[in-house]
Image (cartoon, rainbow, N blue to C red):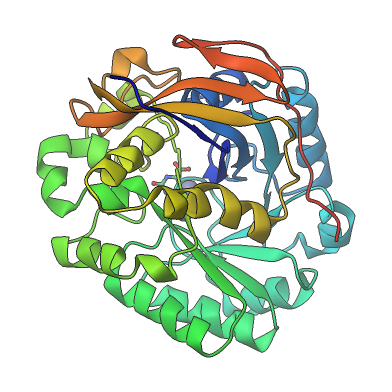
Amino acid sequence: MPKILTLPGLIDVHTHLREPGATQKEDFESGTKAAIAGGYTAILDMPNNPIPTISEEALKQKIKLATGRIYSDLGFHFGATPANYPVFEKIKDKVFGLKVYMNYTTGDLLMEDMNALEEVFSKWPKGKVIMVHAEGETLKKAVNLAKKYHQRLHVCHISLKKEIEAVKQAKKEGLDISCEVSCHHLFLNSDDVKRLGPFGCMRPPLSSKEDQQALWDNLDYIDMIASDHAPHTRQEKETPGKIVNGVPGLETSLPILLTAVAEGKLTIDRLIQLTNKNPRRIFKIPEQADTEIEVDLNEQYTINHKQLFTKCKWTPFEGMEVQGKVKKVVLRGKTVFDQGRVIGPYGQVIFPEMV
Ligand code: DOR
Ligand code: ZN
Ligand code: ZN
């Protein structure tokens, strides 16, 4: 018996759509189709492309390329470099956050130099989010910088016990801080890497069972679940001697989370907070009128790459039995997903709400 539930459209603050510069992995069309099929009606794109979003021109180009071609709503983050703070004021109203890469990962945006980091943290407009990729000990550096310059900090993809402990401590001290966790860190661990090989490699890497359990134990301190959808082609993933980090996530996150609801690990209300209410409030994402999704809480199926809209056509969750399926998505009154088909493009480029 189907059990249909209507939910608000999900919001993902952490997606890598790869256009321009790496459209063999994903582009605005394929990535926003994947978003819609996964129940996301608004997503925010990361800056670490081969053509990175680190200048006003690059941002304008992204907006232009996306306009008229996107199926979900789409906004952008800006990438920090040691030299681009002079444009912060010009771009600040067009982007949702500033991403600072404090550890090595995909792309060329690594920033480790303390003087450069001080410059970035001191110059970014106050009250707007600074998002950090800061693993383990590096997170302490980010928290100290945010404290020193009274910045609003968002910690991406926490995966370790010591990271959630650090966030918890900073929250207790009253710091303006939020954090996200990704489904791969909640539902997979380092034991799965043996089975998945390169398809289980991402930054931060899958952590130990103890670290994974610490994320579940501290779910109350986690503000949102982000997909960290980071597609790479199978061929890129399988190139011997080369580790390419990142896994897709837009189409698997909701069914996996609904399965956790069916298993009693999460309530529907908490799921809505983590995937809609908190991301919308923290990143000032504009309301989407007449927008909702329908899921069947009873439908069971096996995750299969053949059904995915992402260009990369693989998933680390292949073969997983899930309960909870996206049946329909409505965006501003228009049906944009029905019976497995994505309809559109009806997405819009979005900008942060001014308050
Ligand atoms: O695994 C990852 N992939 N982690 C990141 O931080 C970046 C991402 C990507 O862009 O491929
Ligand atoms: Zn990252
Ligand atoms: Zn990422």
The quarter of the rendered structure image containing the N terminus is: top left
Q: Residue at x 52, y 70 (%)?
A: 112
Quadrant of the rendered image containing residue 205: bottom left
Residue 150 lies in what quarter of the image? bottom right
Against 65, residue 350 (above or below) is: below
Q: Position of residue 96 (x, y in %)?
A: 71, 52
Question: Residue, x 78% and y 73% (percent of image)?
Answer: 126
- Decide if residue 151 is in sight here: yes
**View extreme (right): residue:** 90
In the rendered image, residue 134, in percent from the top left (x then y), is placed at: 46, 67
Where does the image place residue 321, in percent across and percent down from the top left?
19, 29
Q: Residue at x 46, y 81 (%)?
A: 140
Q: As drawn, is 37 to the left or to the right of 320?
A: right
Residue drawn at the location 74% of the way across and 62% of the way down: 83
Which quadrant of the rendered structure holds the C terminus?
Answer: bottom right
**Closer-to-camera residue (169/228):** 169
Instruction: Give the answer, above or below, for where 80 lies relative to 161.
Output: above
Q: Nearer the viewer, residue 258 or 311?
A: 258
Could you tell whether 345 is left or right of 240 in the image? right
Front one among 27 and 105: 27
Number of numbered tags placed on the structure image: 0
Vertical relation: 162 (above or below) 35: below
Residue 23 visible in image: no
Q: Position of residue 342 (x, y in %)?
A: 55, 12
